[in-house]
Image (cartoon, grey):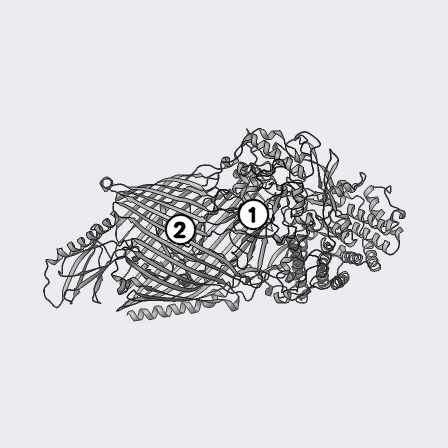
Amino acid sequence: MNTTKLLRFSKVMYWLFLFCGLLGTSFWRPLQAQTTTISGTVRDKEGQPLSNASVAVKNGGPATTTDQNGQFSLTLSTQNPVLVISFTGYLPTEIPVRGSNNLELILQRDDKSLDQVVVIGYGTVKKSSVTAAISKIENKQLDQLPAGRAETALAGRMAGVNVSSTRARPGEAPVIRVRGASSLDAGNDPLVVIDGFPGSSLDNVNMNDVESIEVLKDASAAAIYGSRGSGGVIIVTTKKGKTGKPQLSFNSYAGVSIPRVHHDWISSDEYYNYVVKYLNREYVWAGGDPSIPVWGDPRRPANYQVNPVIKERNVNWQNEVLHTAPIQNYNLAVAGGTDNAKYYVSGTYRNEQGTLINTWYKSYSVRANVDFKISPVVNAGFMINPNYNRRRTSSFSIEALAKYPPFVAVRNPDGTYPKARDYWGAVVTGGINPLGLLYANQNYSNVFNNIGEIYVGLNLMKGLKFRSSVGANITYSNIDNYQAAYGNIARQPTGSAADYKNILLLNENVLSYDRNFGNHHITAIVGQSTQTAESRYVNMGIVAGSYSNNVIQTLNNAVISPTLTSTTKSNWGLLSYFGRINYDYKEKYLLAASLRRDGSSRFAPDNKWGLFPAASAAWNLSKEDFLIDNKNISHLKLRVSYGKTGNFNIPDFGYLGSISNVYYSPNNTLTTGQAQTNFGNQQLGWEENNSYDLGIELGLLNNRINFVFDYYNKKTSGLLYQEAIPATTGFSSSLRNTGVVSNKGIELELNTKNMVGRFGWQTSFNLTVNRNKVVSLGGASERINTDAYGMGWILRVGEPMFSYYGYKKIGVLQDADDVANSAILAGSLPGNTKYLDVNKDGSINASDRVILGNFQPKMLLGMVNDFTWKSFDLSIIMQSSIGAKLYNFENQYYQGALAGAMRRSLVETQWWSTTDPGDGQTPGAALSKLTWQANNDFYIEDASFLAVRNINLGYNLPNRLTDRVKIKNLRVYTSMTNVLILTKKGFHGYNPEGYSYGEINGLNSKPGYNSGSEPIGRTFVLGVNVNF
Amino acid sequence: MQTRIFFITGSLLLLAGVTGCKKVIERVPDSVLTTAQYFKNAKDIDLAVIGVYSSYQSRKQTDYMLLELPTDNLYRSNYTLAAGADDMDNLSITPSNPLLSTFWSASYAGIARANAVLSNIDNPGDYKTGQKEQFTGEAKFMRALFYFDLVRLFGGVPAVTSQLSIDEAKNLPRASEEEIYTLIINDLKEAAGLLPDKASIAKGRASNGAAAALLAKVYVYRKDWPNAKTYLDQVNGMGYGLLPSFANIWKLDNEDNNEMVFVMKYVEGTNGQTLSSAYLPFGGIAGIATSGNESAFPSWDLLKLYDENDSRKAATIESYYQAPTPANAPLAWLPHVSKYQVKHVINSSGLDLPVIRYADLVLLMAEVQYGLQHPDLAVAEINKIRERAFGSSDHNYTVADISTDADFTDKLLLERRLELAYENERWFDLVRTNRLLTDLSVEERSYNIATETAQTVALAPKANYSLLPVPQTQIDIYPTDVLTQNPGY
């Protein structure tokens, strides 16, 4: 095969280089002296000197590092020594020294990903020595993916890490789940650690500054973060300066985002006919005679008539409120340094306009990472990352806008916004013109955030280091909402404001030790961390209708409402002690163990402290004698791990029985009263997550094929949630530790270098299967939360969390006979849903409800293909999700209610009358019968999809061109996101990942409930990277 | 050198760890008042009593979904958003109906607040004269009011008179109906003795008149006519009376009128009620509000009963509706409840809602007199209401009209229905007179004014509906068989 030839060729070249290097030095015959001084230069393949490379004599002789010119000198007594040269990112090379001066040593870049360094909490470890399940992704082209939010770039890249954008709004954070959701009330978001600062937010990450992102997936790795590791840990490492001349780089892209919309809106004529059909059906249901003329006949009540005015116009509101929106990103960075001082400084401006008009996200950020080497013993540095994000959001989901009746003009000639009831006073929606809404509602949020940290490091003795750091994460945000009078039905301006301040302080002190004792290698850390947070909220509301005029939007133009205005403060503290030891014998047998003790202010006095142990072991079979020379198997490792993590994401003083303000108005005077509003729980303690992981890593054919497989079993017990308690206590729930949820799954990552050489092709593929299951609810066997329209979300032992729970639709009641002869819900009429009588008692009632699916995907697949040819490179990211079900309640808005806009696929097959019964499976969808449509699986749709998330095509300009303009290298690229999204037939949402009623956040969660998640933007940009 | 640095940093590390320890994790909330710091002085108790009223005030606004929607007074519109409203409207009553658990929980939350007042009443030492008595009376009155609602809907319920732990609560079974009524009567008697008269207490807080009136009503439900009469007579001497005009009862500028024995007070904008908006047509009405919630419509069943000369008709239900837009919109037939229709900001109306109205007491007195074998006096009481309604005695009844018990009940229920429509009396009246099965089997809902036909809906009331089911969500929390279900569910 061609590829193996190429591989062999590169191997030959490698040895040739090494041979030449040796040859060059072998003419020098050393003097047979007691001590020798040898010197030389270490360079890379391109001839660039490598500074800070380690040069040591094998078997414990003297060692040194190269200077900024890559030069070194060593005094040694050994004869014919063998030098070991190592440098991060390069293959360690052993060279027998014959000469003593001007050695020219060339290091080969290490293309084998196995010798990457992986960042783990409070340290790093060689990828080949990792004993836990950790995914790493380096920022090669992540920052070229056009998206307002950095995390979006991670979608589809890592097994076990699901990044889904449930709302496509500018600046919206995607939902990240590492190995499934396990907590009911305490959140499932992973802990974010930026450059060692835990408790950061990905809000503050600018992808241009990112060096790499690691995800600690299993608890043995995450346990070093103890009480916060339950949802996994995302470690972001930003770029650091390197020794050398200052390098200036400029990265930018600009382009447009085009919304991915529905195309099946019905035409003008059809619209009138369907409104007639809809109201006739309602009229028949109300006992009327549909043969009475639809307009102008007094025998037909006004609310069943159809005003012919609706024929006059056919506005497509979806297209009116959406537009092609520009997106742009500019980043300028300078990096460089000397041996004693290194710096990385960058500034970024990003502007993402929403495809929904009047929505945007703008971000301004600066980062400086500076490191000093003060003496061989002392080093110090700081990082600072101020950023300012501004957003304008819409308080309306797409459904509230796209459903607007098409007969309403976009604008009146005088510029005002007409509404449906200006044309027709009955039947139609009383809502406001969608464009009016988008202009009248001015919701702005501004967030200023800075993470800053300063550290001092000491090299105490050989292998022993101490690092102490003090950091602060400061967030100031404010929200200003204003709604002009024309933007609401009350026709009065309204507004509110909120300010928020949060100051998070962190002090960490860590001793670390790293030493080889012969074949034994030990690294260890022991540390202590103190983290405190203080927050302050100011909320201000106005007395309804008190704005003096439409001119001034701030609240000084209104009367402040006493019940809506308050300042509150809160605080928390976390005190931690932790330690970890990693041991390996010849890199063959690897052991790691860690222990963290966390004390949190959030728990009741007797339960403040939690202990979080972890242990893992790995056997690197490929280092064993029987495999070391195996040509096919280049890497084989077995891993096993256990760890315990916790979750402390609960309210600050949730264990206290608290008294709050309540209101009453004796003598018509608003009076503040007080009442206990939180039951309190003096036993409140940690939610604990015990997790096991088994892993196999296999590298074949010199690691051209890399395979990582993991099985995990994660059991979360003592779930923190608002457990229902008898109402006779005066309270409906109390935050307690009850119940168990398990997540089991497998993960597979496969990386292959399909072709190397002039034409390069690499593929990385990942697969995730997670099975979520409620194991216990602390006594109760199930909890059902039923929505206003009858759909339920159930927690049932043995089933995935929050499965849909309702009736099973088996068809449509065709006529009066069918109604009379079927098991029906009380009040059913022809055209309503026919349900499955599960218990066969002849009627439909609560005991006929069954589980109807779940919002969580059954399987996730991701694939990244990278191609290179000459100076071109092409990267294609694909992602697929299988088996998730969404409750697309949004559909009902496009089925004719209130004479709204209709979609052909949602009206064509409906039951309209006994003579126009549709496909027999689609009930008559009417507002008056909403419960009959919504309390069953009619709106539950398979949200499986296959998406080409990104295509990135780049070209590096040849040096002969760039050299003329003093540019080191110049790359131009085009990037396209969401190029293709294939969904299942019968899926009606704008976004297969989209649901609008939020995530799991307590017993009353309704995950998967979609009522208007926005259209996904298909983004096309042109970009450039320039390095000077 | 190196060892010294090692020791210095080591001891620093230890120091940092040890000194920070307690402060870091033992924290005091800045903005959360805790139970341990509360109920210390008279003002705390006063605010806690306000808290008891607050819970009734917020529950009150949606009581109609349990008490009017299932009756022949009201039916659900297409806009009703509340889960379970549909089932109540169609008399498909199941223990899983969320409206039941909401009502149950809200009532017990109010009881717990009253209990908290009572168990801490002795803490403060700074009461002004009469304060302690007043607060005790108010808490007992409100506790009785909550229990009266519970016992009428569910029968015997757990009797809670102190603050319970979760375990205590889980092992507290239902008391008998008798026990609950005893609790109510004792509380009310005590409250009637402790509370000041209406002139000496803020409007909207309970007076001794309110306590006596409620006690009388409780005795009527117990068919204890002599006791009921005693307390009705007592109230009659306290300055309450019927206003000359029925329509004037429901005016913002005429709140706290003599007909209101006990009301829930609301203030527009900041502490308003949603009921005014709930009944308002979706398009709003010029001069009332720019938009309504149109949650429910009046049933033709009720509307058709109003005589054209009955002044209560227009003040209870408005038959025609003119949309504010487009300009010159035609007047359309759209009957809607107008009893609480005052100018208001949507969902925050300032109109007070009566809990006990004097007209109710007059009709209760009619029952009492009839029960005491004085049909002439009973007719006189009903006629007081009719004379006010019609502005003349032309529509008065005579003793001959109530010659049988059934006739009397017919006339009484009709009058109660016309007078107290949408004041949450209908369901209780049907239950206590055993009219549930007969009166609710068919409901005439909408009415076509052009064809003069009503849309009739057949309902299937069941005998066991006289007690609503105990919410399943509550039963599930208890150990098996502690919180038992009512029969037939």
Q: Badge 1, how many Cα within 10 Å: few under 14, some, many 20+?
A: many
Left or right: A547 in relation to A357: right
Q: Could you say where residue B111 lies in the image, as x and y percent from the top left? A: 68, 60
Task: Reply above or below: B162 against B298.
Answer: below
Residues at marks 2 and 1, CA–CA distance in whole angstroms:
40 Å
Left or right: A1016 in relation to B298: left
Q: What secondary structure is marked by label 1? A: helix
Question: Tags 2 and 1 in contact by the CB under 8 Å rule?
Answer: no
The residue drawn where x is 10% and y is 62% is: A30
Is residue B286 visible in this depiction of the protein? Answer: no
Residue on which disc 2 sits: A205
Front residue (pair A666, B83): B83
Task: Give the residue type at disc 1.
Answer: Asp
Q: Could you say where residue A443 lies in the image, as x and y percent from the top left? A: 51, 44
Residue on which disc 1 sits: A937
Task: Reply above or below: A794 against A57.
Answer: above
Q: Quadrant of residue B418?
A: top right
Q: Could you say where residue A18 lies in the image, as x and y percent from the top left? A: 18, 55
Task: Give the residue type at disc 2.
Answer: Val
Q: Disc 2 is attached to a residue of which chain?
A: A
Front residue (pair A195, B45): A195
Q: What secondary structure is marked by label 2? A: loop
Q: Could you say where residue A655 lies in the image, as x and y percent from the top left? A: 55, 63
Instruction: Report the label total.
Output: 2
Mark found first going from the N terminus, 2 or 1: 2
Q: Badge 2, how many Cα within 10 Å: few under 14, some, many 20+?
A: many
Task: Reply above or below: A796 against B311.
Answer: below
